[in-house]
Amino acid sequence: RLSEGGGKVIWDKNNKPRPCPGLEFDRPGALFLQQGIAVEPGAIYRIGAEIKAVDVKDTACLHMDFFDAYGGSLYHVITEMPSGTLFTGTTDWTHDMFEVEAPSRATFVEVRLYINGSGKVFVKNLMLHKA
């Protein structure tokens, strides 16, 4: 369990040839599994992955948050952040992909698996590259 409670990192051990990571959340609110990556301001980036949702009550998706040189997010509202398809309920593995231009002040991006509300979400074959 995470220190804030309600969420934990989980693994889909039925995925072959190796398990893939995910998140489980049991209450209202949001949770991220994220990785920071350096970016070039103004460059176009393509992100893609396969997502699987299990009993997601609200939404789950791929999500990106760009940051400046001081570590401050360049977005003031979470709904302004670039994101992919919104998943809800239970879905099989679904490919999702989108492109976004890095803001002019961006130095790095946090690529996130996002869940809002209770349920489980998994990710595999995640890739980010300059288009």
Image (cartoon, rainbow, N blue to C red):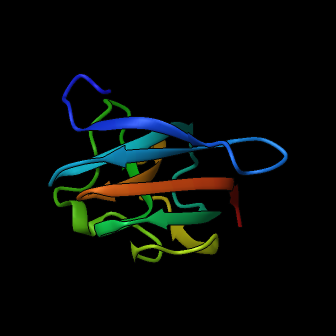
Residue 46 can be seen in this image: no
Measuring from the top left, give residue 49's x and y in whole percent: 64, 62
Residue 73 can be seen in this image: yes
Q: Going by the image, does 62 lie left or right of 26?
A: right
The residue most toward the front is 14
Residue 65 vs 48, above or below: the answer is above
Residue 47 vs 69, above or below: the answer is below
Residue 4 vs 62, above or below: the answer is above
Residue at 58% x, 49% y: name it.
40
Residue 112 vs 94, above or below: the answer is above
Residue at 19% x, 28% y: name it.
4
Residue nearer the viewer, 68 or 57: 57
Q: Going by the image, does 106 lie left or right of 3?
A: right
Q: Quadrant of the N terminus?
A: top left
Measuring from the top left, give residue 87's x and y in whole percent: 42, 74
Q: Going by the image, does 125 lie left or right of 12?
A: right
Measuring from the top left, give residue 71's x and y in whole percent: 32, 32
Residue at 38% x, 33% y: name it.
69
Residue at 45% x, 35% y: name it.
9
Q: Quadrant of the C terminus?
A: bottom right
